[in-house]
Amino acid sequence: MKTTDRHYEREFVRTFFTSPAAVKGEDDSAKMTRKAAQLSGMQAPDVWVPDNEDATAPSMRDEGVQNIIDVVSEYGADFPGEIHPRIVWHRESPETRYKGFQQMKEIADPENGAVENLDGFVVPEVGDIDDWKKADEFITIIENEHGLEEGSLSMSVIVESGESELAMGDLREEMGKPSNNLQRLFLLVDGEVDYTKDMRAMTPTGELPPWPELRHNTSRGASAAGLIAVDGPYDNIRDVEGYRERMEDNRAKGMIGIWSLTPGQVEVANEAPLPPQEGSWLLEVDDREVELETEDGREVYEGDTVTLEEEDGEYVLEIEGDAQVLSEDELREELLDMTSYVPSMDDIVNSMEEFEAAKEAGKGAIAMTQSATLVIDGVEVDIEKDRMWDEATYQAAMTPIALFQDVYEHRPDQHDELEELYSEDVVERAVEVGSV
Amino acid sequence: MKTTDRHYEREFVRTFFTSPAAVKGEDDSAKMTRKAAQLSGMQAPDVWVPDNEDATAPSMRDEGVQNIIDVVSEYGADFPGEIHPRIVWHRESPETRYKGFQQMKEIADPENGAVENLDGFVVPEVGDIDDWKKADEFITIIENEHGLEEGSLSMSVIVESGESELAMGDLREEMGKPSNNLQRLFLLVDGEVDYTKDMRAMTPTGELPPWPELRHNTSRGASAAGLIAVDGPYDNIRDVEGYRERMEDNRAKGMIGIWSLTPGQVEVANEAPLPPQEGSWLLEVDDREVELETEDGREVYEGDTVTLEEEDGEYVLEIEGDAQVLSEDELREELLDMTSYVPSMDDIVNSMEEFEAAKEAGKGAIAMTQSATLVIDGVEVDIEKDRMWDEATYQAAMTPIALFQDVYEHRPDQHDELEELYSEDVVERAVEVGSV
Amino acid sequence: MKTTDRHYEREFVRTFFTSPAAVKGEDDSAKMTRKAAQLSGMQAPDVWVPDNEDATAPSMRDEGVQNIIDVVSEYGADFPGEIHPRIVWHRESPETRYKGFQQMKEIADPENGAVENLDGFVVPEVGDIDDWKKADEFITIIENEHGLEEGSLSMSVIVESGESELAMGDLREEMGKPSNNLQRLFLLVDGEVDYTKDMRAMTPTGELPPWPELRHNTSRGASAAGLIAVDGPYDNIRDVEGYRERMEDNRAKGMIGIWSLTPGQVEVANEAPLPPQEGSWLLEVDDREVELETEDGREVYEGDTVTLEEEDGEYVLEIEGDAQVLSEDELREELLDMTSYVPSMDDIVNSMEEFEAAKEAGKGAIAMTQSATLVIDGVEVDIEKDRMWDEATYQAAMTPIALFQDVYEHRPDQHDELEELYSEDVVERAVEVGSV
C-alpha cells in the first residue's frame, strides 16, 4: 500500500479561514463566528477555523469554547467546507497544553451537539515530534471518552518554531508507528508571525520575511506524509495584488492552500489556484513580467523598456538602455528566453488530450510547440517554443485539473460561480479530462 | 522546563571578530592579538576570537598558543566582550583533532592564567554529530584535568561542510543525552569559504555563493537548540554597503550575528541590527528600494523610473516605460504594493505600547494603520497601510527591542555611543518597554 | 579513513545524457541508442543513459532491454564516457519494482555480453531510504547470480519525490551499514518534472519551478556522502541561454552536473563548467550583469541605464533615473558594490601560485587585489577590489581547476577541443597547478 495515501476525502485545501471565537465588548461575542458559519459559495473557505487562540483574548476563551459549540451545532450541518476549531497549545507550557485538552474535550462532547459537524482540531505552537504526539494522544483519549471512533477527529498543526519545522522531516516515519494515531494529521499550516518571533528574525519594515525554505520544507513534509500544506496569514489585508503574488509563489512550491483573514481574502484565494479563462503571452524584463496585447493574432509589446530595430537583416535589441546587435537567430534565442505563455484551462486540456493520443500511438515523448508573432516597435518576429512532453509532464499538467475536479466534487455550492467564470462546456470538459 | 532555554547569559551576539594568533615576520608576532584585546566601545566585538587556525600559518601555531595565553591573561579581564579562541580541528584528520585537544588543554591550563578570562573555544571543520561529540568530550576531559566545573567552557562550531549542516538538525535531540555535554554549545557559525570548497561550488567571479539554505538551516538549528547563529566572513572588506546588505538579509533569516575581519567591520556590524533613529518611506521598483524625501509631511519621489499623471479621475502610472491606466482605487492598490515604511526605534516602541493598551481592553487583535501622502510628479495620493497585530505580532516586534536591551545590559562600554545615536530619552524608553 | 572518499574513479560528472532505448514506428527501434553510443569528443557525455523508462513507451520496453544489450555490447567498449541504463522502478508499485529487477538482471547477464561495458544502473522514482535499499539489494542479488564482484555495478537514483529528498539526509549514516551495499551509489539526479508532480506544484506558464531548496539538498547530500549531484532535464531545448544560466546557478550550489536531452545540450554542458579563456569585468544593474568593453586597458560601460557626471569633485550617479550625489569615496564604494571580475583560467592559476608563494613565506592569509579603470560617460574611476585569501580560499579556487584536471584525465577524446579552446600551454599549466 502507498504510505502516501491521503487519509481524508478532500485532496486539496485552498483556503484556511480563521474567525475569532469570542470578541469582547460586543453584545453578542459570537457575532463574527456566526457570520463566518453562514458563508457559502466562493466566499466560503474549504476549511473554516473558529479561532480560540491568538485571535481571541485570553480572558474570553471560556466564552469562546461555548460560542464554538453553539454556532457549530446550529450552522455546522449546512456549512459547505470543513470545520476545524483552533484551541490553545504551547510546546513549552504544560498549563497551556492542559487547557487545550480541556477545550477539545468540551467542544467534542456529543452531549453538546457540535461534534457531528466537526472535522477536527487545529493545534498551534507545536514543538518537536514528541510534542505532536502529546496532542494526538489527548485527542485519542477524548475520542475514547466520548465514544467516538478512534482517528475520526483529524489534527492539523501550525508550524511556528524551528523544532516543528524539523519535525516535519520525521512525520513519514512516525506516522506508521502503532504507538500513536498521527494518521489523523490533515493540514501542515505555516504560522510565519510566531515563527519569525521564534527565529528572532527582523526586517527593516517589520514586514514578515518571505521564509522560502520553511514553505518548501512544509510542502515537502506534506508531500512525503500525504498531508496538505497551507501558508500562513497575509496580514496586509488591503494589498490584494501582494496576496495573489504570494499565492503564485506558494503554488510553485507545491503549497496550494493559504490562510485567509477575511471573506474577501477567502474569495481571492479560492479562485487563485484555478487556471485562467484566457491564455496570454508574457515578456519578462528583469523580474517583472509584462503581458502582451493580442491584436489580430499578433502579440504586441507596448512598453518602451525594450526597443527593437531592424536594419538589413541585423537587429538592435535594447533592454533598459543596454543595446545588443543580433542576427535573426540570436534575436529569436534572446526573445525565446524573455517570453512565456500562460495557458488557459482550455489550452491545458487540449495539450493533455494531444499527449494521450500520442501515447496511444506508442510514443513515449513528443514535442509540444507554442508559436506566436511578437511585435516590438513594429518589428515582427515569429517565435516557437518547444517543450518535450513525456508521461511525467502530462502528470504534472494534471495538477491544476485535479485541483479543479476536486473543488467541483466537494464544493457544489461553487458550481454556479465556476460556470460563470469558465462557461458551462469548459467546465464540463475539465471535469472529464484525464479520467482515461 | 523549556528545552530551548539558552545556557548562557547573553541572548544575542552581533559580532564575531577573529584576529591571527601569531603573525610571522613581525618582531612581535602577537601584535594583532594584543591590539584586538584592547578594543572597546562600538569597535569591540561581542565575541572576540584569537584565531590559531586558518588565519595563522601552520608553522606559527605553537607560538599562537603562547600568544593567546599571554594576551588573554594580560588584557582579558578588561575586555568588554566574550573571548573564544579558535583552535585547529578537522573531521577527517585524527592528527589535527589531537593537536586541537593539546592546544585547548594548554590554553585552559589554570597555571597559565588565561582560563579565568576565557569563555570557551571555537572548533572549526566539524563533521557529523559524532564528530561534535569528540570535541565536546575533549573539553570535558580538559575541564576535569584542570579542576574546572564541567560545562564551564562553552563550545562554538564552524559549520563548513555538508555533514555539519545536516548535524544541526539533530542537535536538539542530542543535547539532552547524559552521555555528552553538548549543552556547552554556544555559537553556530557558518564558514562559507570552506563550505563552498566542500560543496565544490563555483561562481564565475570567484565570489562566494549566497548559500541562503545553509544560513536558514543554521538559524533554524540555533533556534531549535537555543543557540546563536552567526554568519561567516565577508571578505570584500572595502565593500561596506555589500556588508550591510548581507546583514539585512541575514536578519530576515533570524541570523543576527556576523563574522568581522577588521575593527571597522565590527563597528558597522555592532550598529547594523539596531533600529534606525529616523523612520522613512520606501518605494520599491523591481528589487531596488528608493527612499522617499519627506517634505512638509508629504513623501516625495524624485526619481523618474516611475511617472504618474492624472486626467479627470484616471491615472497613468508608468514604471520603467510600461504604462497602465488605473482608477484611483487601482492606483492606490498598486502603490500599496510598491511602498513600505521603515519604523524608527520610537515608532516600534509606540506600536508596542498601543497594542499593550488594546490587550488590556481585552482585544486579541487590532489593526495598526500607517498612512502617508505620496507625491509622484506632483500628483498626491493618500495611502493607508493596515496591519493586523495580535499577540504574536507584538512578540515579533519585540525582537529588535530585546536585542537593544540585551546589548545595553551586557555592553556598558557602548552606552555613550548609543545615547549619542538615539538621544538619552529614546534609550531610556527602549530599555523600559515590554517589561510589562 | 574519510567517510567522504568517493567510491569511484571519476570525481566529476558534467553531463548525464538520456536516449530512448526503443522508439516505436521506426524500422530500427534502436536507431537513437545506436547514434548516441557513437558520440565522441565534446558531444559525448560523461555519463550516457540508455533510457528504458519515461522516454520509452511501456509497450516498447522489452524491446528496449534487447536494444540496450545489443548496442552496449557492440559500441560500449569504445564509448568515451560511462554507461548507466535507466530501468523502471516505483516506490509505490511492487509490480514496477519487480520489472526493474528483471530488466537489470537481463541487461547484466554476462552471456548477453553487455555487462563488461556497463558501469551501473539508474533507478528512477525512489522513495525513502528503505526503498533505495530494495534496489541496492536487487543489484546485489544480480551480481551474485551472475558471478560479478559485489558492488561492481554502481547505482544512481533519480530524486523526484519529497521522501527521496528527505532520504538524502540519511545517506551518510546508512551507507556505512553492513546490511546494505549502498556504497555502490554514484549519482544523485534531480528529476524536477516528476518531483513537481509529486509536490503538486503549479506555475502559470507550466514551466517547472526553480526548486532551489531541492537542488541545495541534493548537492549537500552528495557532498556529505561522497557522491555526485546532477540536475534534471532542461526541456526548452532551443533556449541555450536559459540552459547556461541554469548551469551557472547550479554550480553556485555545488551541483556541477546536468541532464542533457540532445547532443547539442551535451556539448554546451560539457563546456559550461570550465573556466573561460578570457577574463572580463561586469557591471551589475539590478539583477542583470552587463559586460564592460575593454579599450586600451580601461573598462568602458556603453549602456545608458547608468549615467555618471563629475562636477568639481562631486559626482552624480544615476541608476535608472534615480540620482545620488556622491563624494569620490562614496562613488568608489558604490561602484565596488556594482562591479565584479570574471577571471580566466589563466588568472585563476596565477592567483593560486601567488598564494602558494605567500604560504611558503609563512603567511596564513594575504589580500589579493584586482584593480581596473572604469569609464562611465567618459568619467574615469579607478577601483580596487580586495579579497582576503587564506588556505580555504585557495582550496575553493582549486575546484574549477580540479574539474578541468579530472576531465583531462578521463576524457582523452576531448584533448584536441580543449587545446583549441585554451591554447596548448594554458592547458599544460592548468594540468600542473596545485599538485604542490
Image (cartoon, coloured by chain):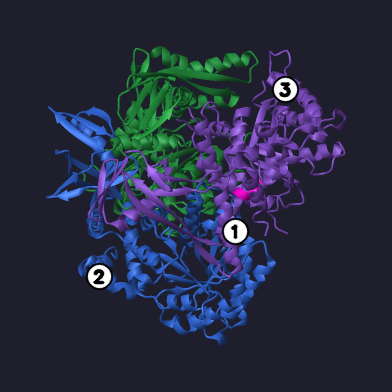
Chain colours: A green, B blue, C purple
Q: Nearer the viewer, mark 3 or mark 2?
A: 2
Is A35 in the magenta?
A: no
| Quadrant of residue A365 within the rendered picture | top right
Distance CA(mark 1)–CA(mark 2) = 50 Å
Residue under numbered circle 2: B419
Q: Nearer the viewer, mark 1 or mark 2?
A: 1
Rendered image: mark on residue A140: none
Which chain is mark 2 on? B
Q: Are marks 3 and 2 in contact (CB under 8 Å)?
A: no
Is C402 in the magenta?
A: yes
Majority secondary structure of the magenta segment?
helix
- Image coordinates of residue B302 in percent, x first then y, are 20, 44
C341 relative to A346, above or below: below
- Please identify the residue farthest to the bottom as the structure is shown: B111
B3 relative to C248, above or below: below
Q: Is residue C273 left or right of residue C60?
A: left
Query: Dot 1, how many residues are within 10 Å of its Cα: few (below 14), some (14-19), or many (20+)?
Result: some
Viewport quadrant of the C terminus of chain A: top right
Q: Can residue A180 be spotted in the picture? A: no
Badge 2 element: helix
Magenta residues span C400-404
Which chain is mark 1 on? C
Query: Dot 3, how many residues are within 10 Å of its Cα: few (below 14), some (14-19), or many (20+)?
Result: many
| Quadrant of residue B397 within the rendered picture | bottom left
Residue under numbered circle 3: C61
- Image coordinates of residue B240 in percent, x first then y, are 37, 58
Residue under numbered circle 1: C353
Name the amino acid, label 1. Glu
Disc 1 with disc 3 on a shared chain:
yes
Q: Is residue A235 left or right of residue C131?
A: left
Q: Is residue A324 left or right of residue B203?
A: left
